[in-house]
Image: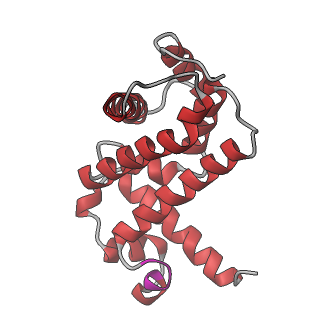
Amino acid sequence: MMDLRYQKTKIAILRAIEVLLQNKDFEKISIKDICEAAQISRSAFYLHYTDKYDLAKQCQLELIETGNRLIKESIIVKRRELMLTMLNLLLGEGRVLALLISSHGSSEIQDNIRYLMRENARENILPLTNLKFENTTEERYFLSFFSNALFGVIQEWINSGQKETPEEIVALVDKNFLFEFE
């Protein structure tokens, strides 16, 4: 069982970075800013993360792990359900990641997220589709198209203040998708 103080400090760090990202670009946020907003010492921050990039990476990995777990547990079997779940995760426990995707995030983090989305699609989504590729080049370009298109939609939704519900975004994307899960 994790120490309660450790958990509270981690939550304070996540809340602090969330608040900071609403008004400040990720590149301009310092560890000092995070510690002051979280009301913790630098040493407490470093017990959890090596730097702010490690914090961002951990947020990404936790959200992707949650999404992968839902896919593998067969809770989600349709593309529509998957996207709805992921958008709801960004509204809930993935709020920090949502802000890292926004215009206040960093291009390095956004590139990494796009890469992770592409690899996740390769491993966890393509096997659920009826798509057949003639060669690896065709698959690679499809995955690039797919991950960049979804990333763009999500980024636009976040940058515009998430005014639409996840259901409305899924309906918009659904109108334009070329494949369905088997």
Return the residue found at the far bottom.
Answer: 43
Task: Point out residue 154 in the picture as x, y percentages from the top left corner.
Answer: 43, 33
Q: Is residue 155 above or below residue 52?
A: above
Tell me the residue at 56%/73% (across/down).
10
Q: Is residue 70 left or right of residue 45?
A: right
Q: Is residue 24 above or below residue 39?
A: above
Tell me the residue at 44%/46% (across/down).
119
Task: Point out residue 41 in the picture as x, y percentages from the top left corner.
Answer: 44, 86
Is 132 in front, or is 77? Answer: 132
Return the residue found at the far top.
Answer: 175
Q: Chief secondary structure of the magenta span? A: helix
**In the rendered structure, does residue 47 fall within the stretch colored magenta?**
yes
Question: Which picture quadrant has residue 166?
Answer: top right
Q: Is residue 173 left or right of residue 52?
A: right
The chosen color scheme is secondary structure
Q: Is residue 128 left or right of residue 48?
A: right
Image quadrant where one finds the N terminus: bottom right
Task: Point out residue 134 in the picture as x, y percentages from the top left corner.
Answer: 40, 24
Task: Point out residue 99 in the picture as x, y percentages from the top left corner.
Answer: 41, 48
Tell me the residue at 38%/59% (across/down).
20
**In the rendered structure, does residue 118 fall within the stretch colored magenta?**
no
Is 38 in front, or is 72? Answer: 72
Q: State which region is magenta.
A: 45-49
Is 105 in front, or is 118? Answer: 118
Is 83 in front, or is 159? Answer: 83
Tell me the residue at 48%/72% (across/down).
38
Q: Is residue 10 above or below residue 161?
A: below
**Count of residue discs:** 0
Image quadrant where one finds the C terminus: top right
